[in-house]
Image (tube, coloured by chain):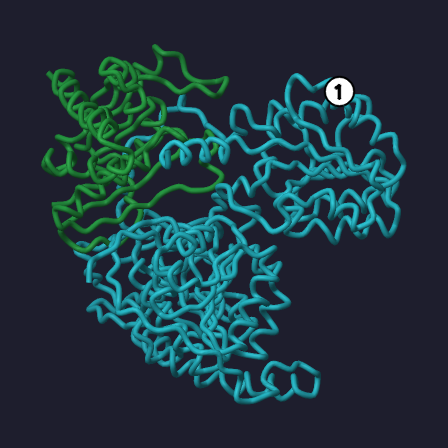
Chain colours: A cyan, B green
Amino acid sequence: MKKLLLLGDEALAQGAIDAGMSGVFAYPGTPSTEITEYIQVNEDAIKRDIHRTWASNEKTAVEAAVGMSYAGKRTMCCMKHVGLNVAADAFMNSAFVGANGGNLIAVADDPSMHSSQNEQDSRFYAKFAMIPCLEPSSQQEAYDMAFYGLDYSERVKLPIMVRLTTRLSHSRAGVIRKEMLAENEIKLPEDPDQFMLLPSYSRAKYKKLIKLQDELIKTSEESPFNSYEAGEDKSLGIIACGLAYNYVKEVFDGGKSPYPILKICQYPLPKNMIHKIMNECDRILVVEEGQPIVEEMLKGYMPNDKIRGRLDGSFSRDGEINPNKVMAALGMANTTGEAIPENVVGRPPALCVGCPHIDSFNVLNDVLEEHGKGHVFSDIGCYTLGYLPPYNAIDTVLDMGASITMAKGAADAGLFPAVAVIGDGTFGHSGLTGLADCIYDETNVVVVILDNATTGMTGGQNYCIEGRLEDICIGLGVEKEHIRVVTPLKKNHEENVKVFREEFDYEGVSVIIPRRECIQTLAQKHRTAKVTK
Amino acid sequence: MKKDIILAGVGGQGILTIATIIGTAAVEEGLNLKQAEVHGMSQRGGDVQSHLRLSDQPIFSDLVPEGKCDVILSIEPMESLRYLPYLAKDGILITNSTPFINITNYPEAEMLEKMLANVKNHIVINADEIAKGIGSARAMNIVMLGAAVKHLGLPMENFENAVKTVFGRKGEAVVESNIKALHAGRENAENNAK
């Protein structure tokens, strides 16, 4: 079959479509967004009418995927690493109920935090939940793992994690497709108790999951994705996980390493393979993207000089791995070219020219002048850039939805004014429950929902509560006269300042909705309109 | 055959289009390819780069190692210098001379010129002016691609075909102006090198 040039994200998506997946459930988040976006426009996916619209958040996505798996169909849910925190309850319990139709949980980690608020390694979650984890080292493996993973999930009756990292997610290479499989028919679980987690049932399921671990290890030993490459020089053995395998191969001419290499792309760790390289080699260098999970497991608690990696400084403790870091860890000569000239300055990301958020921040800054700094709790989205000059308009960011609840906590402590600044998409993701808390407590907060009619930072996706913000706020109990919609434009500045002031003065829950479409999605619409004309 | 290329610019300048065209041209030649892109936050007016690796042998790393890059191709002059640690000793830096200034501490023109002149092998052309000159200001990125053609190890014909493939959807006129831009860039780079 013809080679397709696909991003790692797209390769996984194409693989899942070809392996007979009936539905993808996801919330956008860099670097995972392109998995679902690919499926949304894929011809075969459209022809089969695979479920492919966005979910409210990662928790609802995982739950829906478990539901589809319950019905016997193959499914995948996708999220970025921090999204798995949101979905953690559903995720952990999904290991207990297991899978009926194949269930892939694709999580894209962002080491070096290119577009994230933290760095965390999802392999810990797979270990925590005691489920297998696949970690592709190439786009082709990402494709193949969709087939393997969905099949494995059905055989072992467990959800399977696929862990990607930014560089693979957003790197393109040739992928060879396989024959497309038919979708599963609807078929309920053979065991009617399978998806029931009453404590008495859960106890049995936990024992079963524990007992299954040996079988999972055995499958890892036989996995096509784990391999042992012999090497003459046994003074060192290299354990290379996922994408890091490529960086190791890169530093040797023609990929030929003098040292044995154990490539790990499927977990739990293949115990015998690990024993083999540990016994054969004097020292072991663990090369892994993310946190030193494998290194820590091998090193143990007692002093152990044999294992090298991130913990002994062979690699930096944080940040992405790259070929030059591998060279340094192996004591090879540094190939780095000329230094960056000192007059080359940083160019931090910024709000687009004409962005509606700019006008909202200008209004907010004017109103807050009399109160001083430290009153604005914000959230995850383009508007997080409002922290940077020239706006300096917000003070905190924690996680999706935390603007409202942090403002509430600060207001409960007596801080006045307490302002939350959250985007419409993020509000839909996890702002509603926080606002309900404020209503329940009659907290004195001003919640500013920046409505640009899209999920902007990830490239303009739809979201579930689009067009219904006021109704939802009223439904949650916000008083109608304290839901104020304004148009964030320079010419409306004075008028908008007045509205903000009025709501600051109101003792209770106010919601202000500055509403103007994202200029990026607007421009996109104009372009598409032009082409279709 | 092996070419390691770093494409540089500011978000929105069209480096991913260049990457797609080179990629299409390389696939026509039957080469292996890996291309790492930047998505997400850095796209918003920040610096963006793409690592593009072509080879008739298997390619392992998605990233070009530092000191191994054959060609830095940049749409913005200061951005071209940001990737100097990647440039091989005999590698070449090819950049547009028109600055994109969205920061307050952008280096003075004279300083920028001096920094570029210090790079052993370099081609600097004013792609914005050339593109305007041929009546298609938006094809500035393709002018830059044209300037690099000689150093990418693929026949011109492949690039022309790739431009047709990539822009075909937008109509004949767009294809024409981009092919014109490709040639204008190549000619200017050759004159510049003389």
Kindly identify the residue that appears in the image at 68 percent across and 45 percent down: A468
x, y percent for residue A126: 51, 69
Q: In the visual, does A51 lie left or right of A438?
A: left
At label 1, the amino acid type is Glu
Q: Residues within 10 Å of mark 1 (few under 14, many from 20)?
A: few
In the rendered image, the quadrant that contains the C terminus of chain A is top left
Kindly identify the residue that appears in the image at 19 percent across and 25 percent down: B147
Q: How many numbered tags mark residues here?
A: 1
From this viewpoint, is residue A12 visible? no
Q: Is residue B191 above or below residue A55?
A: above
x, y percent for residue A390: 60, 22
Q: Quadrant of residue B183?
A: top left
Front-lying residue, A57 or A180: A180
Q: In the visual, does A229 lie left or right of A507?
A: left
Q: In the visual, does A3 lie left or right of B40?
A: left
Front-lying residue, B136 or A321: B136
From this viewpoint, is residue A347 visible? yes
In the rendered image, the quadrant that contains the N terminus of chain A is bottom left
Q: Say which element carries label 1.
A: helix
Q: Is residue A81 above or below residue B176?
A: below
